Image (cartoon, rainbow, N blue to C red):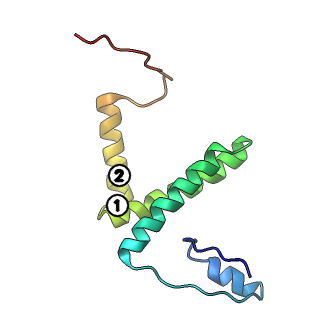
């Protein structure tokens, strides 16, 4: 029996049981959940970076977006609030659309 020891999406246990397989799981305490969300986000970012095509990249970005929704709740906020913060930062500092790569800034 493979051992996973990782955070999974909410419906995964049901999917495994419907496949006729047995599993063991536990519900994480709040701090463990936060740590595991962070690990999962790092894992998904690696998978995004390793995507071989746009379809795979979009799949990984969807996973990252789902994790961002969960992480936002942990920090006592909502995705709507996160989007407001993102927009405010974009208005103040811009986005990343222009592909600007800063090489150097002269020190005074």
Residue 33 is at least partly visible in this image: yes
Tell me the quadrant of the picture where the N terminus can be found: bottom right
Tell me the quadrant of the picture where the C terminus can be found: top left
Tag of residue 78: 1
Identify which residue, 73 or 31, lies in the foreground: 31
User: Depth check: 92 or 35 in front?
Assistant: 35
| Distance from the alpha carbon under mark 2 to that under mark 1 | 6 Å
Residue 51 x %, y %:
69, 45
* Percent position of residue 75, x then y: 31, 62
Q: What residue sits right under mark 2 in the picture?
A: 82
Q: In which quadrant of the rendered view does residue 105 lie? A: top left
Q: Vertically, is 24 above or below 105? A: below
Given residues 7 and 85, the one toward you in this image is 7
Query: Could one spot residue 66 in this view of the protein?
Result: no
* Mark 1 secondary-structure assignment: loop
Tell me the number on the disc at residue 48: none
What's the residue at 61%, 77% (across, down)? 11
Mark 2 touching mark 1, by CB under 8 A? yes
């Amino acid at each position: 029996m493979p051992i996973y020891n990782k955070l999974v999406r909410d419906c995964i246990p049901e999917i495994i049981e419907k496949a006729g397989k047995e599993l063991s799981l536990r519900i994480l305490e709040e701090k463990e959940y936060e740590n595991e969300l962070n690990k999962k986000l790092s894992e998904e970012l690696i998978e995004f970076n390793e995507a071989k095509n746009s379809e795979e990249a979009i799949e990984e970005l969807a996973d990252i977006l789902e994790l961002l929704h969960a992480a936002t709740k942990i920090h006592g906020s909502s995705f709507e609030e996160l989007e407001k913060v993102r927009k405010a930062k974009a208005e103040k500092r811009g986005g990343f659309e222009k592909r600007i790569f800063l090489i150097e800034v002269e020190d005074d």
